[in-house]
Amino acid sequence: MRQLFSGNEAIARGAWEAGVKTAFGYPGTPSTEILENFARYPDVYAEWSPNEKVALEAAVGASLAGARSFVTMKHVGLNVAADPLMTLSYIGVRAGLLIVVADDPGQHSSQTEQDTRHYARLAKVPIVEPGHAGECREYMIRAFELSEKYCCPVILRTTTCVSHSRFLTDTAERQEHPFPPFAPNPSQYVPLPVWGRKLRVKIEERLDAQVADNAADLAWHREFTRQSDLGIISSGVTALHCLDVFPEATILKLGWSWPFPDDLLRAFAAKVKRLIVIEEGDPILEEHVRALGLEAEGKNVVPRTGELTPARLALVKAALEGQDANLPAPLPSAADLPTRPPILCAGCPHRGIFYALAQFDVVVTGDIGCYSLGVFPPLSRTDVVLCMGGGFTMAHGMTKAGETRPVVGIVGDSTFFHSGITGLLNIVYNRSPATCIVVDNRTTAMTGHQEHPGTGCTLQGEKTASASIEAIARACGVTRIQVVNPYDIAETTRALKEELSAQEPSLIISRAPCILKEKKAIGKPYAIEPQKCKNCRACLKLGCPAIEAADKRTKPTINPQLCTGCSMCAQVCRFDAISS
Amino acid sequence: MNRNIVLCGVGGQGILLSAKIIASAAELTGFEVTTHEIHGMAQRGGSVTAQIRYGRNVHSPLILEGQADVLASLEACEALRFGHYLRPGGLAVVSSQRLIPVTVSTGQARYPENLDKRLQQAFPRLILRDFCALASGLGDVRMSNTIMLGALAAELAEITTETWNEAIKLCLKPAFLNSNLAAFQAGAKA
Ligand code: SF4
Ligand code: SF4
């Protein structure tokens, strides 16, 4: 039966059909729904691990113990899991192991644009790139076979467009793949140099075999034969866009995209008069095609950055033909529209801590999560964001460099467990006076409310131990710890004042559940009494989307459909004009 | 023939559910279907768009600017923002509801005043109604999205009313079914 699956749902389905027993991951847009969907299938184990490195290492253990396994993460997550990946390529797998990585060309929800194919080449493992949900399912099944054939992990790369587009997808029954139990084999699984050097040589032999295999195994690739004037080599969803935008071109869509199917590339090039490689991300395939001695165009006309949308491909086509693309431009009457950037939700607990922080002259090193949005006006209270865990560690470095203002490092609760703890440990160990804040909203909010080690609940909905941020901080040696309710602005401001002046490491835990998750915390909406309101606009400094003011002359009003009754605006109004 | 439909609005308005219903109706009619969703980082308050393509020969899930048969928006400003997706002769279905973004409330931007006029100039074929008010009249503002579907359904003549009802049934919880079927009808008459 066919179902309308998103790419992520189809990956989960394919994994289940392939007999996967165990799956691990860390949430990250656009990959998150894969594991959430997989966890709902019968006879499987799935978990949110504290971070991607833990997830991959756990999957390696599971594969060695004989369970088909996969891990999920977004592209930057693979940076965290890169260490085990490199050695995994040496020791190899027993039961199939897939690393499912979602790239985000165009940076819809990411700090960087990264092409995961580089990691495949760096780790010397195969990578496959489905273009739509049907292929997501099919490639999962086939990639497990590939992984077991070569005893190596395989990366399956999606992009945001693949993960979040829906296509009608075939489904089939689950096939079990039992493996004998783990048997020690140190020369294979313990890469001490004496054995590691031998494994290193084997990797190259494996790659040579894969190059030949990939060119021969045509089920991975699709050729759409049309006219021979222009030939396009592409992969993933980009190839699908090309099918629409270049109706006359002959197109080779690669499914197993590294190691490259050299013979196939040569044969295709021979069939067409003019060859262009159209790839989203870096010119990895294009450079290889040229290295094979084939004449090809590519990034001379194809954009190097961003998502290759049909519109941008239409521009490529126009450039190739020396013509005008004739694409409609945005409407002239849309030129002065107000933007609608992402913002902290109405009643978001993070608003309280950022509003309080805005009262002080401090440097704020932030982190990845909804609270990155604290950078936007009117709160404007984040100065730098680097990576998961960087909120604490950068604060440490700033104090060591002699920054004269107090330095505040912010991480979220999920981020604290992901990679914040080591940063806190370093602050204590190496004695920095940084003020650390964990904005603890009891969930991984940005990616859609996933559980984490502090929530007391597993991905599969079972009760479990709930790690205490306070106890971990105390164990690291932090002695100054305050827990504040961020909805209480006066109390939060007082705690900040105390800790900012402390000359030793200190931790503030700003704790209140995410309002989008804890719907029962939503109270009666507040309203502004127009008679009492002096239009001083103090409440607008909260940046709450429920408080609307069409222009400067109009007194603000509260949209009762958006207001969650958090009371913060009532606390900041000096004229007592706001009440519930 | 492929059909291209662009939906837009603001997070929380139910755009994604509307996309699901259209896709389901197209699938029930026997077409190949693909949908695509873009939602910003935050779940509420940001611009949200969804694209639906169906027909006999669908490849890319993304619609090229200037090729949408229908552009439907639950917010007046957002319709203009995505207006260039509509093909010449295509139909715009727009709710006159205005949602003031924080950028306006905090004085960083202005919300345009003459929106109705701008919409009429931009879209020769325009259905402009206050779906939000209509939905409130039917007892639940959250049904604006279903009213909008009713308003655009006639343009997609290849999908029958029975099929629309069937699709709504598939996509909604039974408790909301009857009110939404009524909302769909109200939209068709609007
Ligand atoms: S803070 Fe109070 S007086 Fe000032 S604009 Fe807001 S509601 Fe009016
Ligand atoms: S009480 Fe005030 S600050 Fe809180 S959600 Fe409502 S309008 Fe926004």
Image (cartoon, coloured by chain):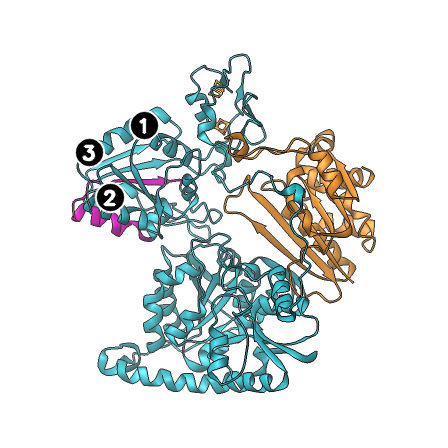
Chain colours: A cyan, B orange
Coordinates of residue B78 in the picture (x, y in percent): 64, 42
Whether pointer 3 and pointer 1 mark residues with C-beta atoms closer than 8 Å, the reply is no
The kind of secondary structure element at disc 1 is helix
Coordinates of residue A479 in the picture (x, y in percent): 19, 38
Q: Residue at x 25, y 52 (%)?
A: A422
Q: Residue at x 73, y 43 (%)?
A: B122
Q: Residue at x 55, y 12 (%)?
A: A531
Res A473 label: 2
* Marks 2/3: CA–CA distance: 17 Å
Residue A212 placement, left or right of A335: left
* Marks 3/1: CA–CA distance: 15 Å
Res A502 label: 3
Coordinates of residue A2 in the picture (x, y in percent): 67, 65
Looking at the rendered structure, the kind of residue marked 3 is Ala
Q: Chain of mark 2?
A: A
Name which of mark 3 and mark 1 comes first in the sequence. Answer: 1
Looking at the rendered structure, the kind of residue marked 1 is Thr
The reply to whether residue A260 is visible in this rendering is no
Name which of mark 1 and mark 2 comes first in the sequence. Answer: 2
Res A214 label: none
Looking at the rendered structure, the kind of residue marked 2 is Ala
Q: Chain of mark 3?
A: A
User: Residue pushed farthest front?
Assistant: A322
* Residue A25 in the image: above or below residue A499: below
Whether pointer 2 and pointer 3 mark residues with C-beta atoms closer than 8 Å, the reply is no
Instruction: Name the residue carrying label 1.
Output: A493
Q: Local crowd at mark 1 within 10 Å, few (<14), some, or many (≥20)?
A: many
The reply to whether residue B29 is visible in this rendering is yes
Judge depth for marks 2 and 3 and give the one in front.
3
Segment colored magenta: A419-441
